Amino acid sequence: MIAKLKNGILYLYLFIMLGIFPLFYKKQYAKMGTSKFQLFFYISLICLGLLFLLFLLQGIGYIKNRKHSEVTNNRIKFSMMDIGVICYSLCVILSFLFCDYKGEALLGAKGWSMGLASQMIFCAAYFFLSRDLKFRKEILYVLFVSSSLVFLLGILHRFDIDPLKIRVGLSEENKKMFLSTIGQSSWYSSFACTVFPLGVTVFFLTKEKRMKILFGIYSALTFMTLVTQNSDSAYLSLAAVFLLLYYVSFDKAEQKKRFLQLLILMLLSFKAIGILQVLFKERATVLDKLSIWMSQSMTTTIFFVVTVCLYLWKYHIQKREPKNCKNRKPFYILLSAGVAVLIGTVLFIVLNSNGFLLKTFGYQNTNNYLLFQDNWGNNRGFTWKFTVSSYRDLPIMKKIFGVGPDCFKAYLYSIPEYAERLNEYWNGLNLTNAHNEYLTVLYNLGILGFISFLIMIFGGIFRFVKGRIQNPYSIAFALCIASYAAHNFFCYQQVCCTPFLFIIMGIGENILRTDHETKNRRISDGGFTGI
């Protein structure tokens, strides 16, 4: 009876968070983040609070029954991701206990609210979902429907089409900054990049024609909205997703074919948006250079044509797959080349930015991406340098445990020297995080929190990549974590993305644990059907 009650509460929680939350807004964009946080916070307190009470009742019942029955030594098994989440939650608690700003640390900085309360909700949601949920495919279909509507509205907004009249009264500058029913464009990008790999995976794996068509449309909507959302972070997310998909595509010949189909679909979606931007130039929002390059440049057009030709040759002319189709040598070559390019780019940026190239060769590249200075990456250059230098000056205890959950602002502005420099650079605006989740976690939760966060993220990716042998759709959850991790290298925790990360991890862990307990379960090919 208690198990059924817990499962019913989890269904309600997921319906609200996955179905209603993405579409929920009040008073257009005025305090949209605040209203969404209130919905998340109160529904989480109610649902997770009831689940905790039921958990206690179960524990009491277990203790009573144990006295009158044989004791069996059943070990509780934890995955690496479980351990990461446990360590992360403990580090949050320790950081709160050692911090000097408990009022700020409890609920978090104003407008962000990523303090102790939210962090504990994230971790509790993960464990209740991973242990007590009886998974049904309809859970994810709710998210597919709501996110499809969010993405479609985001695309329409970029062409000044506003069916909900949500943008009435916004200036042209604000129309560029706010999007769909999520709000700020960077928040929108965070939400999209956290959830879209679920639908893309269905297209990648399904053998049902109807499902392939439906999720092909979903994937196209995803790619169209990502190329118009106007945040460079999304392209790093896409790169992480396609790199991991390329690795997985070597499992089966059919998956290699699907990988190329997805790549073609993404490039076709980009070019379709580019054509619309040219045809409806007066209505189209003027985006930043990278987004325009992705949708309109000749380079992406050539890449699209080459990919289509490769696909046609490989699957309609050659019509055969090499015997060694599982040989991942091409992947490792690509990965090595990518790492080499990344290292070379970073080295070039360092030498270009510290004046070495100018002094030695009389050359300096002034491209904003290649010259790391204060205004680099929308002023992330200043923020990252300031965060690293001020972290070096922290007392040893704060280096270990951090300044407190979501206390980045509270600590920095409590020191007159720091506050003066920040106010001078930001003209009185408050800096609440490092605009890099890893640096922010390091600063707020210390080195212990930073390590536990990495264990959680990379332990989760490894868990779900390995789990695809047990359940092929496990890869969807690895892609979501990888996408979030890549995106938030340039972004931050907030209510429109971080709860979804923990919910998705919890659902994925639940599926693998359930499959392990029922090893003979048959997995069908229709999306997440039968899981």
Image: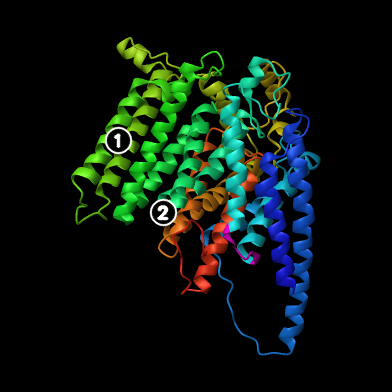
Relative to 381, say whether 256 is above or below: below
**Percent x, y of residue 479:** 47, 48
- Tell me the number on the disc at residue 342: none
Q: Secondary structure at mark 1?
A: helix
Q: How is the image coloured?
A: rainbow
**Percent x, y of residue 339:** 34, 38
- Tell me the number on the disc at residue 307: 1
Q: Depth check: give the residue in front, 95 or 292.
A: 292
Residue shown at the point (22%, 40%) measured from the top left? 313
Q: CA distance from mark 1 to mark 2?
A: 20 Å
Is residue 116 something one can see in this rendering?
yes
Residue shown at the point (52%, 48%) measured from the top left? 454
Side (left or right) of 471 relative to 255: right
* Residue topped by disc 2: 205
Q: Is residue 134 magenta?
A: yes
Is residue 492 something one can see in this rendering?
no
